[in-house]
Image: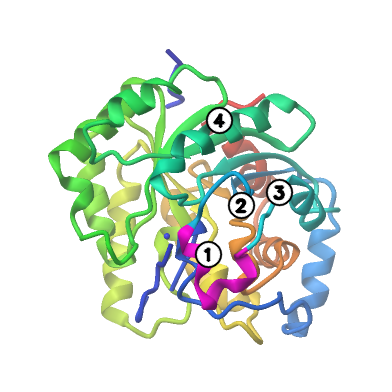
Amino acid sequence: MRRAIGRREFLTQSAGLAGAGMAAAFVAGESPLSSHAADAEQKDDAVADPQIPIVDTHQHLWDLTKLKLSWVSGEKVKSLNRSFVTSDYLEATRGLNVVKAVYMEVDADPEYHDIEAQYVIDLCKRGDTPTVAGVISGRPNTAGFKDYIARYAENPFIKGVRQILHVPATPRGLCLEPQFVESVQLLGKLGLSFDLCMRPGEIIDGVKLVDQCPDTRFVIDHCGNMDVQSQDQELRDTWMKGMREMADRPNTVCKISGIIVTAKKEGWTAADLAPNVNFCMETFGEDRAFFAGDWPVCTLTASYKDWVGALKSIVRDRSPEFQRKLFHDNAMKFYGLT
């Protein structure tokens, strides 16, 4: 047993998308590389800095000759309806000093979960790609989950499990059903983490799950999925309350990611992202937050380079130690990477 160290659609109607399965809420298209020239100089200067190595904790890859992803067939995400493989990722991250990546499950149809798991294990074994570990798909609310995860629990490349909880078909409170809770408790016993990718107004349900699973480590994906454009103050207050309570639990960390897809497709700036980013970093602290790319889903709004540049612009006044923890050190420690 390993030692534990330690959104298909997110904003449906009022709330956006983040992560592999949430792309249906956005109009597909190419990255607006010149749509925010006001930040260009800052971004380019930051991106050019080779001193901070990056560990990408949310790398999506999919080969549609091997996996079926029903969610990419929608018209609104047509730019994602193709394979995205390692060579594409290397091109997207070229010059950014991405030294390691943790594969994140891509909301493949459930009958492909074992195929996906083997896909990421084989990818990690190659040793000639940035991908060195993976978080695989799973359905903790099913009776077969125990046998499923037993097949991978001892594999050194598998670090955790995720089920996206904000798809329209998923009811609120699923993560609090007894079978779900029992399965997530099992992950803790196996030294595996669980990624919480849920609606921003339901983070408090995640807190209740965490309280029942004190031995399981949790990753809150995409800054808790709060839309950076939302004017719903009640929703924002609920999200902030939930995130604060989540941060009060010592077995939780926060991914600084995903929110770029909730920004305006044209004309966004780093300042649009900063309130959510800064709130999460200050709430969880410098030792419990880390960067994640969410590529290629981020390309519905921005390129990988622009997302990295925006985040570096936001944190440029923070200490070098803080920045290194955010982009590299915290992820290395959490996932036990070498």
Residue on which disc 4 sits = 118
Alpha carbon separation for disc pair 3 and 4 = 15 Å
Give percent across and percent down for residue 3: 45, 17
Task: Find numbered disc 1 in the image and state the secondary structure of the residue it sits on.
Answer: helix
Residue type highlighted by circle 3: Val
Q: Residue at x 50, y 72 (%)?
A: 74
Q: Is residue 296 above or below residue 266?
A: above
Binning the other alpha carbons within 10 Å of mark 4 as few (below 14), some (14 to 19) or many (20 upward) gives few
Q: Which residue is mark 3?
A: 85
Q: Report the residue at 50% width, 38% height from top.
A: 135
Residue 111, horizontal then vertical, whole percent: 41, 42
Instruction: Point out the tag, 4 or 1, that comes first from the N-terminus.
Output: 1
Q: Amino acid at mark 1?
A: Val
Mark 1 highlights which residue? 72
Residue 75 inside the magenta-drawn segment: yes
Q: Quadrant of the N terminus?
A: top left
Q: Judge the density around disc 2: few (<14), some (14-19), many (≥20) Cα neighbours within 10 Å.
A: some
Instruction: Give the alpha-carbon distance from disc 3 to disc 2, as whole Å.
Output: 10 Å
Q: Earlier in the sequence, mark 3 or mark 2?
A: 2
The kind of residue tagged 2 is: Leu
